[in-house]
Amino acid sequence: MKTAIALNQENLGAMPSNVQTPSYDRDKVKTSIVHIGVGNFHRSHEAFYTNELMERYGILDCGICGVGLLDFDRKIYNILKDQDGLYTLVIKNLDGTRSAKVIGSIVEYIFAPENPIAVIEKMAHPDIKIISLTITEGGYNLNEATGEFDFSNPVIVEDMKNPMSPKTVFGYLAQAMKLRKQRGLAGCTIQSCDNIQGNGDVAKKALLNYVEKAEPELLAWIKENVSFPNAMVDRITPVTVASDIENLQEEFQVNDQWPVVCEPFIQWVVEDKFAAGRPEWEKVGAQFVTNVVPFENMKLRLLNAGHSVLGMLGALHGYKTIDEAAHDEDFSVFLKAFMDEEVTPILGDLGDIDLDQYKASLIKRFQNVYIKDIIPRICLESSAKIPIFLLPTIKAQLAGDGNIARAAFVVAAWCKYNDGTDENGNSYAIDDAMSNELIRAAALSHQTPIRFLEIEPIFGDMVDNKAFADAFLASLKMLRSKKVKDCVKEMNSKLA
Ligand code: CS2
């Protein structure tokens, strides 16, 4: 075996010919984007699009400065430092072929816990036109049921007390915007790239709520000078595992400490509302539209909810990855019927979108056996995901007397999931900001099944809806008395 070459700027010229490397001059790249939360998804999506612009069009004024706010980000900080901001994106095609591309668009990185002032200054720098975010669905600090900003969160309380050494994204944004205002600088765009309906509106609401209390005199300036475009973002990007690192060394002779693997599909539909201009991402496939709502609805309620369906059912059954669950005939019949009968009716007019084709392509994407998207990634933080991906579908269906049997079954499966053991007796961790409450409610639900729906921050008053509560209770009873696959078979034949 040939020795793999360590990935860094100096070694780029020595990379084997089957690895695509940046051919543009990275020294000439000018940073105009700060991105908070450089996880795998940012690296397969926005950083990828931006690298394409640099590579294919020589547009170099859209460099990215990554920012990590959490202690957890120390690892990526150290690795990107070692690798001069470079990393490899490995695209895994449906036919098993792979391509490897070194991405060079992240040209700076600041680890906030070590240097909060540098982050504030960077975000307030006149060259910065966009501050983009992937801070997860739960990161916006809004109560799921009431939609209100949670001022009781201890880190928020701390940020209000110590504005110059913030911990949260809101503390940072408020200080950076304050500096921009004081210095007479222009505003910028705050661009959410998280899977949330109206993600821009949500980011705006959260920031304005925070600022109203923390820095009230800044409120009007933000309203006037900062824009918050909504966007639909899409590319399935699993967790990187050790074998991805090894495969890259063997197949491409690249030694990358943290590559990203992803599917070939990519989509970004963005509201064209950028306060200080934007890169021409449309040149490389992004779609700029005036209304993203239909795209968001379709993606969150079919793809993301579809993931949760396969994730919850698959976890109980003991499957490890989404492709295994998606290849299970019973689960895929269930999923398809969920999409057709419970989601499609509430999607409304989708204009030119070919929904049948979209749904068929989703099933194929879930079934991509090379992606190996682990079920724990899908199930983690479900308390922030289910209320966005699944509950709006149930509410809309209930409002029109529509069918909710399968969606309610998935909620019941989620309840059982919080027992923490699959049907083979293997236990797993409940990785969720609300894990204590979820585990407790699931435990109580053995005696009093309705207890799970009484988690108010998640379900609000949905527990009072008889049709939903009945469907949930019937499903949970079934799930607690027999295997998930038998339940799914029964559902499939009963509802067919
Ligand atoms: C997944 C998403 O986290 C989840 O539950 O559904 O991460 C999904 O893979 C991406 O949104 C795909 O674009």
Image (spheres, grey):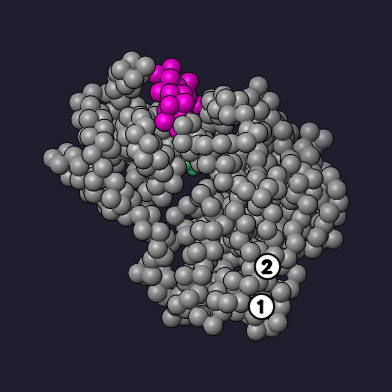
The quarter of the displayed image where residue 172 is located = bottom right
Q: Residues within 10 Å of mark 1 (few under 14, many from 20)?
A: many
**How far from the left and from the top, in percent, is residue 446?**
17, 38
- Per the rendering, the mark at residue 180 is 1
**How far from the left and from the top, in percent, is residue 97?**
68, 25
Q: Residue at x 28, y 53 (%)?
A: 456
Task: Note whether 479 is above or below 428 in the view shown.
Answer: above
Q: Residue at x 50, y 74 (%)?
A: 211
Inspect this view and state whether residue 1 appears: yes
Kind of residue indicated by mark 1: Arg
Question: In the image, 354: left or right of 127?
Answer: left
Q: Residues within 10 Å of mark 2 (few under 14, many from 20)?
A: many
Query: Between marks 1 and 2, how big is the CA–CA gap?
Result: 9 Å
Figure quadrant of the C terminus:
top left
- Per the rendering, the mark at residue 69 is none
Nearest to the observer: residue 104 or residue 62: 62
**How far from the left and from the top, in percent, is residue 136?**
50, 53
Range of residues picked out in magenta: 323-343
Q: Residue at x 69, y 54 (%)?
A: 272
Kind of residue indicated by mark 2: Cys
Question: Mark 2 = which residue?
Answer: 188
